[in-house]
Every structure is written in structure tokens, then in C-alpha cells.
């Protein structure tokens, strides 16, 4: 009898462990948004109407992200408990940054420096919180680096702001995203 | 002498216990995922899922994805409570044996 009951405890532990073992990859999302921002930045320098270019590029990224999430959710056989809290964090981040970008700058309420500082602080918050939920030190470190960049643009000279922005988009979004995509590729090969 | 607790027979079934344990650790899971994880067959797991559903321990949502019918299961509050109570009772029944090294 005791043996049967102990087997039941083992069964519960095994099933819970298996179900919790979820690896969802969001590298494509970081790479997409990072590339979108760098392309928008490049085009806004050479073409007229920079605000329109940013609006089109960011809307396109938003639509592409929505479609990809919908497709992923439709094909995945289960939804992890962490999915909803993470979605809430990144949706909140997206709405906040959209307000800052499309209303804060044209209204004159934000300068390039204050916009970058706010953007970096929000990126730090979103990455750090996601890292804490996932217990993933790499993303916690990424969040911390966004906060450090925010401090740099708050106190650094004017000329480093644009370069810090480009460097952080490239490293914190494009490179981070590509690294995650590479990890996904390796994990799938070993699965 | 304290009375020994009784185990909920709906939860105690091996396959049903496996399903409830999986659902307690995810937000929701599809029929095929539950079948594969428990290494069961369509007919067998369907019967046990129905029993859990009738007991009010899980809920099912049937939708069409790419024109294919898909059943998605979630654990209910009653199911979570029943599983927690079952584990508590199991530990009580095992008493000293439970913390012994295997």
C-alpha cells in the first residue's frame, strides 16, 4: 500500500516537472523590433518626414508581432503560467513607449535626451521583470545594462546620446534576439 | 488514535492524477499534449478526462484551429483544491515513510 502511495507522489512530481519545462523563444521579437528601429532611424536621417517613417516602421513591427504571437499560440499545445504575466509586462511597455514616442516628442514635452532616458528605463524594467519571472540571469543582466545606459544618457554629454541609442538597440535588441534565435536552433537540433 | 484520511477516488486514479498534476502546472493544455505526456491512448484518456470534467475538476474549451477541432483543458478551482487535499492526505497516510530517503 505504502509503495503505491509513494508511486503516486513520484507521479505528481514527474508530471509537474515535465509540464513546467517550457522553453518559449522570443528572439525573433527582439531581432524584429531592433531591426525595425535601426531601419527607421536610418531612413529618417536620409528621407523627409522622420515622424511618419517611425510611425510606419513601428506600426509594421507591431502588426508583424501580433500575427506571429497569434500563430505561435495557435500551434502550441500548452500555455505556460508565465505567458500571461510576460505578455502583460511587454504590452504595458509597448503602450508606454508608443505614448512617449508619438505624443511626448511632437508635443515638445520630451527632448531626445529625456526620451532616450525614459526608453532605456522602460526597457530595463521590462527585461529585468521578465528575467525575474523566468529566473533567467541573462535577461536580468540585460535589464541592468539598459538601466546603466539610461544613467549614461542622463548625465553624459549631448553627443553620446544618439550613439548610445544605436549601440543599445543593436546590442540589447538585435544581438540579444539573434543569440536567442541561435539558442533555439541549437536546442531544436538536440531535441 | 486519529482517524486516517480517505483519498479522493476521482483524483487517485493514476491517469487522472497525472492529468491533474500537469494541469496544475500550466495555464492550459491541449488534448494531444495530455495524451502524449501521460503516454495514453485517445480513448483511454478521453474517458478519464470526462470523469474529471464531470467531477468539476477540469474545464474544457472546444475550438477550431485551422479548421481542425481542438480541445483545451484547464484545471478549475475545485480541481486545484481537490489535488492539494489529495496530496495532504497522501502525506498523512504515508506518515513517517514520506520523508525517508528512497
Image (tube, coloured by chain):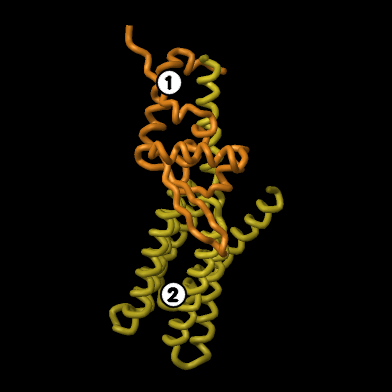
| Lateral position of residue A37 relative to residue A191, left or right | left
Task: Give the residue at the far top of this rendering.
Answer: B1
Q: What residue do we see at 47% from left, 42% from top?
A: B23
Task: Give the residue at the far right of this rendering.
Answer: A189
- Residue A92, labelled with which disc? none
Spot the yellow chain and give its letter: A
The Cα–Cα distance between marks 2 and 1, rounded to whole angstroms, is 60 Å
Q: Quadrant of residue A114?
A: bottom left
Q: Nearer the viewer, residue A147 or B4?
A: B4
Q: Nearer the viewer, residue A168 or A64?
A: A64
Q: Chain of mark 1?
A: B
Q: Position of residue A33 (x, y in %)?
A: 51, 71
Q: Are marks 2 and 1 on the same chain?
A: no
Q: Position of residue B47 (x, y in %)?
A: 53, 38
Q: Position of residue A148 (x, y in %)?
A: 43, 61
Q: Quadrant of residue A24?
A: bottom right
Residue beneath disc 2: A161
Residue beneath disc 1: B91
Q: Position of residue B9 (x, y in %)?
A: 44, 26
Q: What residue do we see at 47% from left, 86% from top?
A: A53
Amino acid at each position: 500500500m505504502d509503495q503505491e502511495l509513494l508511486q503516486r507522489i513520484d507521479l505528481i512530481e514527474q508530471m509537474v516537472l515535465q509540464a513546467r519545462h517550457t522553453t518559449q523563444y522570443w528572439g525573433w521579437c527582439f531581432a524584429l523590433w531592433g531591426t525595425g528601429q535601426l531601419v527607421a532611424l536610418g531612413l529618417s536621417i536620409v528621407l523627409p518626414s522622420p515622424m511618419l517613417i517611425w510611425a510606419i516602421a513601428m506600426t509594421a513591427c507591431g502588426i508583424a508581432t501580433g500575427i506571429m504571437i497569434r500563430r505561435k499560440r495557435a500551434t502550441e499545445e500548452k500555455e505556460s503560467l508565465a505567458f500571461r504575466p510576460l505578455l502583460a509586462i511587454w504590452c504595458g511597455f509597448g503602450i508606454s513607449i508608443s505614448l512617449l514616442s508619438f505624443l511626448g516628442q511632437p508635443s515638445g514635452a520630451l527632448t531626445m535626451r529625456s526620451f532616450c532616458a525614459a526608453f532605456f528605463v522602460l526597457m530595463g524594467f521590462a527585461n529585468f521583470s521578465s528575467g525575474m519571472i523566468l529566473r533567467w540571469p541573462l535577461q536580468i543582466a540585460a535589464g541592468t545594462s539598459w538601466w546603466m545606459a539610461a544613467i549614461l544618457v542622463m548625465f553624459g554629454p549631448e553627443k553620446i546620446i544618439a550613439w548610445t541609442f544605436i549601440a543599445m538597440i543593436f546590442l540589447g535588441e538585435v544581438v540579444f534576439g539573434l543569440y536567442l534565435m541561435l539558442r533555439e536552433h541549437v536546442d531544436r537540433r538536440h531535441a | 488514535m486519529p482517524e486516517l484520511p480517505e483519498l479522493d477516488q476521482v483524483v487517485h486514479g493514476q491517469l487522472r492524477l497525472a492529468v491533474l498534476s500537469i494541469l496544475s502546472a500550466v495555464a492550459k493544455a491541449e488534448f494531444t499534449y495530455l495524451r502524449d505526456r501521460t503516454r495514453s491512448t485517445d480513448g483511454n484518456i478521453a474517458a478519464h478526462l470526462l470523469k474529471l470534467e464531470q467531477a468539476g475538476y477540469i474545464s474544457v474549451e472546444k475550438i477550431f484551429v485551422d479548421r481542425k477541432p481542438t480541445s483545451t483543458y484547464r484545471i478549475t478551482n475545485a480541481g486545484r483544491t481537490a489535488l492539494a487535499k489529495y496530496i495532504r492526505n497522501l502525506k498523512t497516510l504515508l506518515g513517517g515513510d514520506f520523508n525517508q530517503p528512497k
